[in-house]
Image (tube, rainbow, N blue to C red):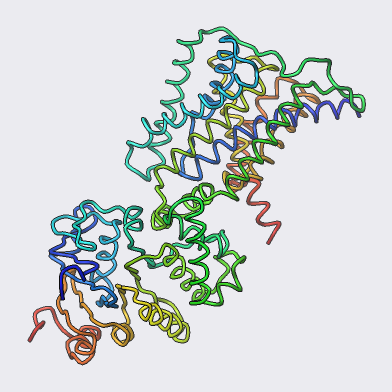
Amino acid sequence: MPESRDVLEVRGLYAGYGSVGVLHDVGLKVRMGEMVALLGANGAGKSTLLKAVLGFVETGKGDIIFEGKALGKVRPEAQIRRGVSLVPEGRMLFGPMTVLGNLELGAYSAGRGRQRQKAISAGLERAYALFPVLKERAHQVAQTLSGGEQQMLAIARALMCSPRLLVLDEPSLGLAPRVVAEIFSALETLRGEGMTMLIAEQDASLALKHADRGYVMRNGKVILEDAADALLANEHVSAIYLGSLAGEGEGG
Amino acid sequence: MSELLQFLIAGVKNGAIYALVALGFTVVFASTGAINFAQGEFFMLGGVLGVFFLRLGLPLPAAVLAAVLATAIIGGAFEALAIRPLSAGDPLKIIIVTIGGSVALRQFALHIFGPNEMIIAPFSSGPPIRFAGAAVERQTLWIWGLTLVTVACLAIVYQKTMLGKAMQATSLSHDGARLMGIDTKKMVTVAFVLSAALGAVAGLAVTPLTQTAFDVGAGIGVKGFTAAILGGLGNPLATVCGGIVLGLLESLAAGYFDPLYKDAVALVVLLGVLFVRPSGLAGLMRRGRG
């Protein structure tokens, strides 16, 4: 695969909070049109990696390369203008604002005046096609939506600026299986449209069922990387998720 | 009866001024989580700069506009020079810097404009208007009119423009706003610019009635802060109500008891709200709705 096809590449990245290092020499690639799953138990460093890519966490050594260009210090408000959009854990919706108000803000970075208006109408059309319930709820205050609807709103809002990489942090967390299925079917639709996605997910089998490739993290390092099918069949992956694989026993 | 009406008119007049200053506190609090103790100085600068531009020979409307703009620019510059360099997200540091800023702005005004009191002629001349046995000074009508127009403009900016929505988003979730591509630091600057303009409008509108000087900021700061706390430091409508309620309480206390009580009322209300109902009127409104 030629280099230019890599939408995102993380190379030898170290990151953490203050003096506490969380990520150690982490590498990862997301190619155009791919859905990549980032797996690992709670505390493995998935969220920190996503936050580092978005600029919410201080990074040390290593590179974050987006569309072939190495980014220096990353700031979240700059990342979205580059085309990286995050659906954060906890959703970070603007609760007292309406569904429509939230969606409009999603297009904030799409330019000014008429250009933004155009982005808003195109984005709304796509959002309502993907999640028809949001159209019904357009004038409802976001914090009164159900958890599933809020997650749909968070995804729809992240799409409003037509990102070239959609990053999702634990999209299934706390949701009923029926809702999770609905959300992943929407993500499949997006993939059909050619959207490149990086998804951190605790539910490994769910993520691998949909993803093209996966990375397994543990203690702030990537310990496995493979095609999704191969990872699904890998006994170590299930062992890691069952927690039966002791640190020393890795690889053995 | 006409006596009560007179007290009410005076109360709503002062209340409108408190409301504008209180909105300035609220706008900055929403984007920083901090109280801007230099807010009263913006009120002072509005009046003092208005006098300055009038003395330069500008006609009244131009002098008013110039004073509001100049104060807004000073507010933005204050944020850029003194607040922005602080590490983000520490309201306590911001509060301390605004206290220092208020001293600096007061001294700046003292050195440039001198220690004397200054006055602007009423915006329109003529005798007070008689109404049901009470008298309404023409400048009071200006105060009400300017307050209404300013609050309406603020509401339009917040509700209808992307800038206003971005400011709301910033106040609701800093990180969420950054994810949308909103430069939250710029929003803080905009908040200071807006709050300075609000203070300046209040200072200008009231100067024909009360005179102004370099040191009027501290007193009005306490009143505006009390009104903002009474309003719950959030909802703009509750903030305006907080201002009016405070103005009315003061006016009634001064009228029916002793004018000396007027300034004590704000402190009693401030302490009372903080002890009994820290969520202010907004808390009451929320409860009323639920």
Quarter of the view holding residue A17: bottom left
| Position of residue B13 measured from the top left corner of the image (x, y, whole percent) | 73, 28
Q: Camera-side residue: A113 or B27?
A: A113
| Position of residue B224 measured from the top left corner of the image (x, y, whole percent) | 60, 32
The N terminus of chain B: image quadrant: top right
Q: Residue at x 28, y 56 (%)?
A: A55
Q: Camera-side residue: B30 or B142?
A: B142
| Position of residue A81 measured from the top left corner of the image (x, y, whole percent) | 35, 56
The C terminus of chain B: image quadrant: bottom right
| Position of residue B40 measured from the top left corner of the image (x, y, whole percent) | 54, 26
Q: Is residue B40 left or right of residue B179?
A: right
Q: Residue at x 19, y 89 (%)?
A: A230
Q: Is residue B266 left or right of residue A206?
A: right
Q: How many marks?
A: 0
Quarter of the view holding residue B215: top right
Q: Residue at x 12, y 64 (%)?
A: A12
Above-or-below relation of A104 to A33: above
Quarter of the view holding residue A100: bottom right
Q: Is residue A226 left or right of residue A203?
A: left
